[in-house]
Image (cartoon, helix red, strand yellow):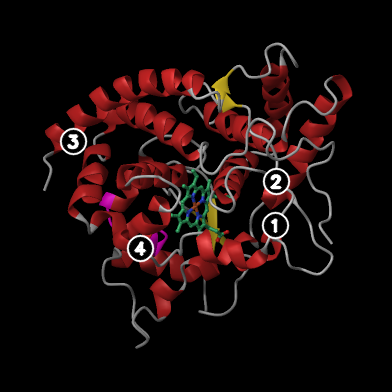
Amino acid sequence: MASNKSWSFVAVASSAILMTMLAVTARADGALQYDFYNATCPGVEDLVRAELKAKFAADVTLPAALLRLHFHDCFVRGCDASIMLKSHNGTSEQDADPNSTVRGYEAIEDIKAKIEATCPLIVSCADIMAMAARDAVYFSEGPDYQVETGRRDGNVSILEEALQFLPPSDGNVTVLTQFFAVQNLTMKDMVVLSGAHTLGIAHCPSFSKRLYNFTGAGDVDPTMDPAYAKNLATVCSTPADNVASVQPLDPVSPAKFDTGYYQSIYAHQALLQSDAALLEDSLTGAYVQLMNNATYLDTFFADFAVAMINMGRAGVRTGVDGEIRDTCGVYID
Ligand code: HEM
């Protein structure tokens, strides 16, 4: 098992080196780059941030929604805004079960409309989503990292692909790592990006199996703190109902971007099975243990920024590939 110390040194050193490497690579391969819209739509990142500041003030649950939206977009056909596409026949990514509680589509559409008014057909929906995820973290008191841009949008969205590529909430570390590897993301990216669960909520059906029928014998997940399980059961009173009831993913500090999520896991108070699983593996468990120490907040911030940039590169379309459309949420059928 990696010791706390060695993992933290690796984390700090690799974050700094990686940041430099990423910047160089982005320029060298002509793909994503920083400030892609500097000449074609100057000030677009400021506009997105200003719009979101107002939206977040009006709805404190929106940052979590927009962070998740970017993740669910990137894992299916890459970060190409395919999750924004709609279907009359219920066959698009949006219609897939894991996306049933995804929110924030309207916020992206509103911002896109504002941008179109000044920079028509210049800025992709996929880039707006990446900026929005970054600003969601920033306004939740998380790191303020620079986002790469230059993505173009896809025009294909298939329900089955969302089922195939979004990781399951009852996955163990081996399974979760495989889902991330498909996106060229490492096990470290996985444990770090899971830290996004420092924000937001889950609905009872996402975790009630852990309270009522963990192994099929009407039992509680033995890795869960019994007092926490009992408390959750009062909100999710039966295995089947309470579909609309929610619980914070990070009970320590639900609206603040910090290491509270890892502290919850360490205290056996993780809400999702996929979160609790991180403690079971020696490497991911070492990271959880490290982040249980609040003095490593800056390390988490640096790691999270790197991992978000990595995720934002998943399967991107650039150059003449893909399209820039005037509305993100058009119908595909
Ligand atoms: C490791 C694999 C992951 C699994 C299995 C997973 C699963 C889930 C589930 C089941 C929910 C609750 C859905 C509900 O009941 O409404 C959720 C919420 C959320 N997820 Fe993940 N997730 C994972 C990784 C990520 C990543 C990589 C990010 C972002 C970088 C992310 C961001 C979020 C956020 C912010 C929420 C709260 C959404 C809200 O409050 O509306 N998740 N996730």
The residue identified by callout 3 is 7
Q: Tell me residue 268's x, y (percent).
A: 28, 57
Distance from the alpha carbon under mark 4 to that under mark 3? 22 Å
Q: Residues within 10 Å of mark 1 (few under 14, many from 20)?
A: many
Q: Please say whether residue 26 is visible from this viewpoint.
A: yes
Compared to 223, does 9 lie above or below?
Answer: above
Whichever of labels 4 and 1 marks the residue nearer the N terminus, that label is: 1
Q: Depth check: give the residue in front, 293 or 42.
A: 42
Residue 157 - label: 1
Foreground mark, 4 or 2, reads 2
Numbered disc 1: secondary structure = loop
Amino acid type at circle 1 is: Ser
Which mark is nearer the camera, 4 or 1? 1
Region rendered in magenta: 266-275
Q: Of circles 4 and 3, which is in front?
A: 4
How many angstroms separate mark 3 from mark 1 (CA)? Answer: 39 Å
Residue 134 drawn in magenta: no
Label 4 and label 1: CA atoms lie apart by 24 Å
Question: Does the magenta run of residues contain 271?
Answer: yes
Q: Position of residue 119 (x, y in %)?
A: 82, 21
Is the Cβ of the residue at disc 4 closer than 8 Å to that at disc 3?
Answer: no
Decide: few, some or many residues near mark 2? Use Cα within 10 Å; few <14, some 14-19, many ≥20: many
Q: Secondary structure at mark 4?
A: helix
**Residue carrying label 2:** 154
For the C terminus, the image quarter is: bottom right
Q: Main secondary structure of the magenta part?
A: loop
User: Badge 4 local density, few (<14 within 10 Å), some, or many (20+)?
Assistant: some
